Amino acid sequence: MTSHASAPFTDALAAGTLVLDGGLSNQLGAAGHDLSDELWSARLLADRPEAITEAHLAYFEAGADVAITSSYQASFEGFAKRGITPDRAAELIALSVELARGAAVEAERRGDRRRLYVAASVGPYGAMLADGSEYRGRYGLSVAELEGFHRPRMEALAAVGPDVLALETIPDTVEAEALLRAARGLGVPAWLSYSIAGERTRAGQPLEEAFALAAETDEIVAVGVNCCAPEDVEGAVETAARVTGKPVVVYPNSGETWDAGARAWTGRTTFAAEQVEGWRDSGARLIGGCCRVGPGAITSIARTLDEVA
């Protein structure tokens, strides 16, 4: 089964390079929204949905072809901690896709003639814990237990027709196996991107091993990395392309480091738009930014890719 939205996205991926958006949280923070809650940007799905639409629109106007939804930290378990019923949680998870789609419609109304896409974010189990464990993995759960966590929200996202599922910031091959299982039969293509440190996943597995898991999974249309240091990207792109033969997705952080205890970013920015030419030459076909990468950087990426097309 293939969703009505799947073919255009996979066709576009086969035809050339697509520009992803940047960090949704930093765009919302720059607009003055408090994201200190455990639900992070997902809190605004209930409290200020229009703010999410505005953030997506800013990235479309900056040159992004793909918006990644605000569902990274949205889960039935996470919402239940706030007293939100399963039915209402399903509505909020679905709303994340509708808000991104609404931003695309508004961009088109303002004169954008490109085909714009929506990637429904599926963040790691550790994001729900809100304790920094998404940067470590090794939760002590089985593949089956992790599949049981992910599958219901993936079904809720798939039901509202995103162009692709973004299985993102995955620190561990155990969780990747669970997500690959959960993606089967949903009727929506997906990409799988790991959070890495050097040549290994955050949990310490070699990238060759991690990428190989997705090589024979038809639902996975791209593999790669995100929420990592820019300097770790090029080697990962080469490995992903070689091991899987699939298009590669990359969207690193600014180069700063997240301090989970202090809930703050430290260090300096090392992200530069000029790096994307090398990433593309190595096999990247979906290129953008993650945390602390804003609309200005996305514009620079889009211009760089246009210049070297």
Image: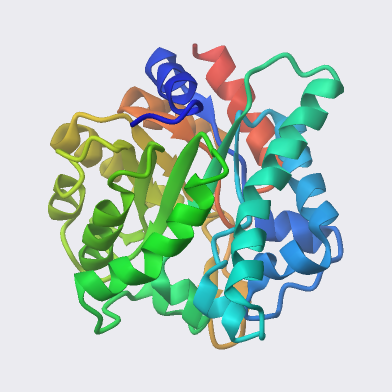
Please tell me which residue is depicted at 66% across the width and 66% down the height of the picture. Answer: 42
Q: Say above or below: 40 vs 198.
A: below
Q: Nearer the viewer, residue 199 or 152?
A: 152
Colour mapping = rainbow
Q: Say above or below: 96 vs 73.
A: above
Q: Position of residue 215 (x, y in %)?
A: 17, 39
Rendered image quadrant of residue 51: bottom right
Q: Position of residue 248 (x, y in %)?
A: 34, 34
On screen, residue 172 versus residue 159, left or right, reads left
Residue 176 in view here: yes
Q: Position of residue 80 (x, y in %)?
A: 58, 82
Labels in figure, total: 0
Please tell me which residue is depicted at 30% across the width and 44% down the height of the picture. Answer: 185
Residue 202 in view here: no
Q: Say above or below: 77 vs 150.
A: below
Rendered image quadrant of residue 31: bottom right
Which quadrant is home to the N terminus? top left
Q: Say above or below: 249 vs 141.
A: above
On screen, residue 286 versus residue 209, left or right, reads right
Please tell me which residue is depicted at 54% across the width and 21% down the height of the picture. Answer: 305
Q: Position of residue 176 (x, y in %)?
A: 26, 59
